[in-house]
Amino acid sequence: MLKKNIESALNKQIRIEAESSQTYLSMACWAEVHGLEGIAQFMYTQSDEERAHMLKLVKYVNERGGHATITDLKAPKTSYTTFKEMFEALYSHEIFVSESINELVHITFEEKDYATHNFLQWYVSEQIEEEATAKSILDKINLIGDDKGGLYLFDRDIQQLTVTS
Ligand code: OFO
C-alpha cells in the first residue's frame, strides 16, 4: 500500500510526464508546419514515449493501492523563434524532469518505500539516456548555426535516429 505522500508525489510526476508529452507534441506540430519532417517525426515519437512513461506510473499507482489522478495540464508553448530555441527548450525540459525524478527517488528513500524506489530506477536510467540524446542534438544544432543547408541535412539525419531508436 502506498503512503499518501508517495502517492501524491507520484501523481505529481504523472502530470509532469503528461505535460512533457504535450510539450513534445506541440514541438512536433511547429516543426511539421515549418516543413521539417524528420524533426517532426522525432518529436512525435518523443511525445508517445512520454505518454508511455505517464502510463507506467499510472498503472503502478493503481496497482499499489493508490489512485492515479488525471488532471488538467499546463498548455505548452506553441511556437519558437528558431530550431535552436526549440532544442534548448527540449534539453532544459529533460533536465527539469530528471530533477523531479531525483526528488521522487529521495522521498521514497526517506520513507523507506523500497518497492517504489526500485520501480523508479527505470526512470533514472531513462533520464540519463534522454538527457544525452537531447544534449547531442543540441550540440549538432549549435554547429549548424543559421545554415539552412545544414538544417536540411540534419532533418534527414534525425529521421534515422527515430527509425533506429
Ligand atoms: Fe523524458 O521524461 Fe519521461 O521520464
Image (tube, grey):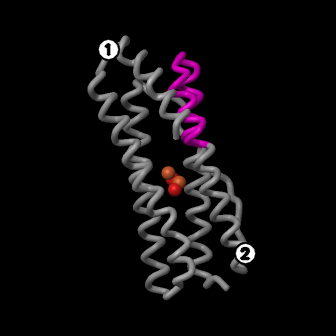
Q: Image quarter for residue 128?
A: bottom left
Residue 45 is inside the magenta segment: yes
- Farthest residue to the front: give it: 164
Give the total of numbered labels.
2
Task: Assess whether mark 2 and mark 1 are in contact (beta carbons under 8 angstroms).
Answer: no
Mark 2: which secondary structure? Answer: helix
In the image shown, does 48 or 106 lie closer to the viewer? Answer: 48
* Residue located at (55% from left, 26% from top): 30
Residue at image mark 2: 63
- Farthest residue to the left: give it: 143
**Residue at disc 2, CB closer than 8 Å to ligand 1:** no
Instruction: Give x and y (percent) for residue 133.
Output: 40, 43
Mark 1: which secondary structure? Answer: loop
Q: Image quarter for residue 6?
A: bottom right
Quadrant for the N terminus, please: bottom right
Q: Point out the stretch of residues depicted in magenta.
A: 22-47
Residue type pointed to by label 2: Glu
In the image shown, does 139 or 107 lie closer to the viewer? Answer: 139
Tell me the chief SS of the magenta region. Answer: helix
Label 2: few (<14), some (14–19) or many (≥20) C-alpha neighbours in 10 Å:
few
In the image shown, does 53 or 129 lie closer to the viewer? Answer: 129
Residue at image mark 1: 147
